[in-house]
């Protein structure tokens, strides 16, 4: 009896045909999905993927701080000269008035001696003028005494001859001679008084001028003496003589900085900040650093507006100076730029230098590819960017460099 043979439903030909149709459909879907978008295959192990988070954004920057004395006094040469003696070196503790250097200046010494000689000449001239004035007064008294005696005699002769002339005992010539003699002596006395008055006034004027010149000379001499004393360079305050930048025999000019004294009664932190933040740094901002396992708080006390090599300097004071801190220590300081606030956060990375924060590659839920998306970023700290728009918490973003991605719109992530 013949038996009917049952035909197989899934023959090799049908299976091959079905697989071909599925492959074609997958290709069509892929092409349609990626039409108009360029893609690039990327090894997932060579990129960094960060998850967008919701948390507290703490705006701060990390800067390098150097511990410095609270006050620093520059040691400048008031007078120039050459270094004859150097009594103290950098690192010595000094008290106010301690001698540090001795300078010599032959020109200044010679000027002082000449001015001193000039002063003594003025003193001699002043004393001679005063002596001459006294002598002139005595001479006037003697002259007036002699004239008064002669005038009395001439007056007696004139009065006696007046009577004799009235009685016609003497001649008119004799009478006229005695009268003229009397009048001449009176006139001479007046002239002598006027002359002596002029001489006295002139002498008094000379004395005043000499006294003024002498006072100015004495003042200049005192100043020159002070300048000579300034050749001995002394510590203006007590503290640490941190440096002395001269050696014996060196020539020093007036006003030249030759050293520095540090006040040991306190410290401050000097930090350098990028000029990008110059408008955001002001006195009162807080900062901190870790020291010996504890957090040390700081506050901005002074901002130096001068920018050098793209950076400016800021002084910060300690809330409480920790034990063991030393001048010249360098520490990383966390400088706050604003108050902490809730925000959407994206980790920092190399992508920013390539996109300026205007777009990123966002990994889709399947994890097999990343698509370019426009975003907007706000503030930044060393760890995170503040996301203003374009991203949601939980999404994953490629945060490493985009340098090798060109203008691709899609990245195919491969293991």
Image (tube, rainbow, N blue to C red):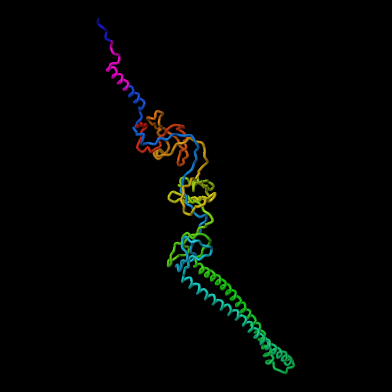
Q: Residue sitting at 65 percent across and 81 percent down?
A: 193
Q: Residue sitting at 44 percent across and 62 percent down?
A: 245
Stretch in magenta: 6-23
Farthest front residue in view: 1
Farthest bottom residue in view: 169
Q: Is residue 272 visible?
A: no
Q: Decide: is 15 above or below 216.
A: above
The x and y percentages for residue 248 are: 43, 67
The x and y percentages for residue 234 are: 51, 65
Quadrant occupied by the C terminus: top left
Q: Per the image, is 405 magenta?
A: no
The x and y percentages for residue 131 are: 60, 81
Q: Per the image, is 10 magenta?
A: yes
In front: 267, or 232? 267
The x and y percentages for residue 46 are: 36, 36
In front: 59, or 50? 50
Q: Decide: is 335 above or below 16.
A: below
């Amino acid at each position: 009896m013949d038996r009917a043979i049952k035909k197989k439903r899934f023959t090799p030909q049908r299976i091959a045909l079905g697989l071909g149709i599925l492959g074609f459909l997958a290709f069509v879907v892929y092409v349609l999905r990626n039409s108009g978008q360029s893609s690039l295959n990327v090894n997932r192990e060579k990129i960094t993927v960060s998850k967008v988070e919701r948390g507290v954004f703490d705006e701060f920057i990390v800067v390098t701080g150097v511990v410095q004395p609270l006050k620093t006094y520059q040691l400048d040469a008031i007078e120039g000269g050459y270094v004859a003696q150097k009594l103290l070196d950098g690192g010595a503790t000094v008290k106010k008035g301690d001698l540090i250097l001795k300078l010599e200046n032959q020109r200044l010494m010679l000027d002082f001696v000449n001015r001193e000689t000039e002063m003594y000449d003025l003193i001699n001239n002043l004393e001679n003028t005063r002596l001459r004035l006294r002598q002139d007064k005595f001479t006037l008294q003697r002259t007036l005494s002699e004239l008064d005696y002669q005038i009395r005699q001439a007056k007696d002769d004139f009065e006696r001859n007046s009577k004799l002339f009235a009685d016609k005992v003497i001649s008119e010539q004799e009478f006229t001679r005695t009268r003229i003699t009397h009048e001449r002596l009176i006139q001479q006395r007046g002239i002598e008084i006027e002359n002596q008055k002029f001489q006295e006034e002139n002498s008094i004027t000379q004395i005043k001028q000499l006294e003024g010149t002498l006072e100015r000379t004495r003042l200049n001499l005192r100043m020159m003496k002070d300048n000579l004393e300034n050749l001995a360079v002394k510590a203006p305050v007590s503290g640490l003589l941190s440096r002395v930048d001269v050696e014996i025999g060196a020539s020093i000019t007036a006003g030249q900085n030759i050293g520095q004294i540090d006040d040991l009664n306190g410290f401050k932190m000097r930090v350098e900040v990028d000029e990008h933040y110059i408008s955001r740094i002001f006195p009162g901002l807080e900062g901190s650093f870790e020291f010996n396992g504890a957090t040390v708080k700081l506050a901005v006390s002074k901002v130096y507006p001068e920018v050098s090599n793209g950076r400016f300097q800021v002084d910060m004071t300690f809330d409480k100076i920790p034990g063991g801190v030393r001048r010249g220590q360098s520490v990383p300081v966390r400088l706050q730029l604003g108050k902490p606030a809730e925000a959407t956060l994206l980790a920092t990375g190399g992508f920013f230098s390539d996109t300026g924060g205007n777009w990123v590659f966002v990994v889709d839920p399947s994890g097999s590819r990343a698509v370019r998306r426009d975003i907007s970023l706000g503030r930044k700290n060393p760890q995170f960017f503040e996301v203003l728009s374009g991203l949601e918490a939980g999404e994953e973003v490629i945060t490493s460099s985009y340098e090798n991605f060109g203008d691709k719109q899609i990245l195919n992530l491969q293991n």
